[in-house]
Image: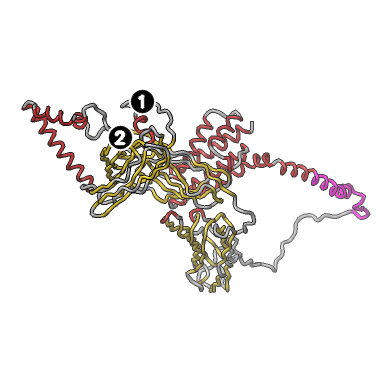
Amino acid sequence: MYLLVTLDGLHRQSERSRRLSLGRHGLLIFIAAMCSAMFSMAFAQDATFTAASDKNPVGVGDQFTLSLALNNAGIGGGKNMKLPDLSAFRIMSGPNQSQSMQFINGAVSSSITFSYILQPKEMGKFTIGAATVEVGGKPLSTQPLVIEVVKGAPRQQQQAAPADDVSGQIGDNLFLKATVDKNHVIQGEQINLTFKLYTRVSVSNYGVDKNPTMTGFWGEDIENPKNIALTNETVNGKQYRVGVIRKMALFPTQSGTLEIAPMEATTQVQLQTRSVDPFDAFFRDPFGRTVNYKVKSDPLKIKVDPLPPGAPSSFKGAVGKFTMSTSVDRKTTRTNEPVTLKVNIAGSGNIKVLEVPELELPKDFEQYTPKVSDNINRQEGKISGSKSFEYLLIPRYPGQKLIKPVTFSYFDLTKREYVTLQSPQIDLNVEQGTATAPPTIAGGTRENIQMLSQDIRFIKVSQPLFTRRGEYLYKSGMFIALTLLPLLGLAGTLVFARQRQAEMLDAAGYRNRRAMKVAQKGLKQAEQLLASKASGSASQKLEFYSEVARALHKYLGDKLGIQQADFSIENVLQALSSRSVNGEAPVALKSLLETCEMARFAPTSMEATAMQKTYDEAKRLIIELERTLKK
């Protein structure tokens, strides 16, 4: 009736109003053309037809909304829609039709929703059967929906959210959720972490403000799409459009209860402008207004069991399922000519963290730092691939040489036991080359020793030592001193043993005293990686940040008495505060730890200057904390 009155009033407009109406009509045509183009883009996706209820269970006197959503049906939409049997409910309103489109980083989807406001007649469980519709000559149907009707509770009058209350208008229609495929694993076992954006409003874009920190994990991106593919999911009876914004494979590097911190993002949401006059509201702002709305996922707890005892000496932390092969580029060579030995480890698991296998070479071989390369496959949510190590070996002396078998051990997740792989031995025939061996060879190379001028002996010029006849050793003071020396040595040994035993029983004190030495050792490894930063690969630069973070974790854990399973930035800052360490050092330490975590798990820029600055800052902070905590 309202629409008829409005149209009748339009017929009585002045000539000026008719021109305005024609202008609005042209805008309508333009908007319709844009909508047609957008629906054409959305039609390329598969059409779906789903049913959902905004609440379940429902009170007898309450009303609920039944929504039939037809997604990605194209320009023509659906035809010949048939409703299910709704005789168990009173139809208070409907059908009410609404259309919407989603644009998320270039991904376009369309939706036509037919909603009915229903009221149950009596208590019980009622099944709303399948609704059907025809799209492009193909029938689609919804899944049956079970509605539970309970004794009605007193209904509270709800107040509408103000038009400028963004949180009140969006509510639970938009949220970010983090999920894992398993929350109880063994150390080194893969965990798939997925961040999904759930929306029932129009989202045009999003940006990640803060990536999650994952202390105690090694992370590898599986999926980080620029264009999101949207799907449908029903949560608590409500239907959402869902897009995966990031998917990662995590490998825990320590045991205990570890936490995955939240991800924070900012979305651009289009809200419709409300108006009493629908004609005026449409032409004043046809697309509504765009607002920024922040979403944040919940933190996750992961329980990590330690690896079982009894690991072989060749085990370096590999977990999964692997195979190993070795090869040399030649079996016959000459002295001082290089031989390339290649070790290839392939399979599924934490391939990125595999360490360089140790070789047992003849003593007259010189070995250079191996070249490491990896090929990672991230398909189907499982990290697999291979990692190869190329060793450059130089034999210095001729003969038949034997390279002992290479040994590699890993923990098999299927068998739940350690498995050791061993390559066959390699026989090399080294012939005499034209070049002679250098006088000094790294790696413990043997040298022939030549004795020259043996016919001339050196003449002693010093005065010989004579003893007086008739003097006996047992009467001298030296004899008494030599007699008492074993007793003094025994007493000193007992005192040292007692002190050593006391130190070993005081584990916390022992770790505290050794903290600086352990940190210096870790920083030395980081300094070596920093020295090769000019020609280093991205993985070597990531390893640099891992070494700096590992040195800081070990130093702070040993110095402050924090177990690695309980290690976090918050615990470190709390421990420093309890020891009256305030001022600039805790703030700088927090910034440095966050920088290392960001560089390891969300690398953006790893320039040489940033690496040098990180190393210098870590060294400065450790020295400053050591001086402060000793007071």
| Left or right placement of residue 289 versus residue 566 in this view | left
As for residue 537 lying within the magenta part, the answer is: no
Q: Which of the image's four quarters has the N terminus?
A: top left
Magenta range is 468-494
In this orientation, does residue 316 appear?
Answer: yes
Q: Which residue is mark 2?
A: 92
Q: Note whether 315 is above or below 432 in the view shown.
A: above
What's the magenta bit mostly, secondary-structure-wise?
helix
Q: Position of residue 132 (x, y in %)?
A: 29, 49
Kind of element beneath mark 1: loop
Q: Position of residue 330 (x, y in %)?
A: 49, 71
| Left or right placement of residue 8 versus residue 447 in this view | left
Disc with the residue nearer the chain's start (2 vs 1) = 2
Q: Note whether 154 is above or below 111 in the view shown.
A: above
User: Observer-nearest residue: 416 or 391?
Assistant: 416
Please state which amino acid type lies under the numbered disc 2. Met
Q: Which of the image's four quarters has the C terminus?
A: top right
| Left or right placement of residue 483 versus residue 439 in this view | right
Report the Cα–Cα distance between label 2 and label 1: 21 Å
Please state which amino acid type lies under the numbered disc 1. Gln
Q: Which residue is mark 1?
A: 159
Q: Position of residue 102 (x, y in %)?
A: 29, 42
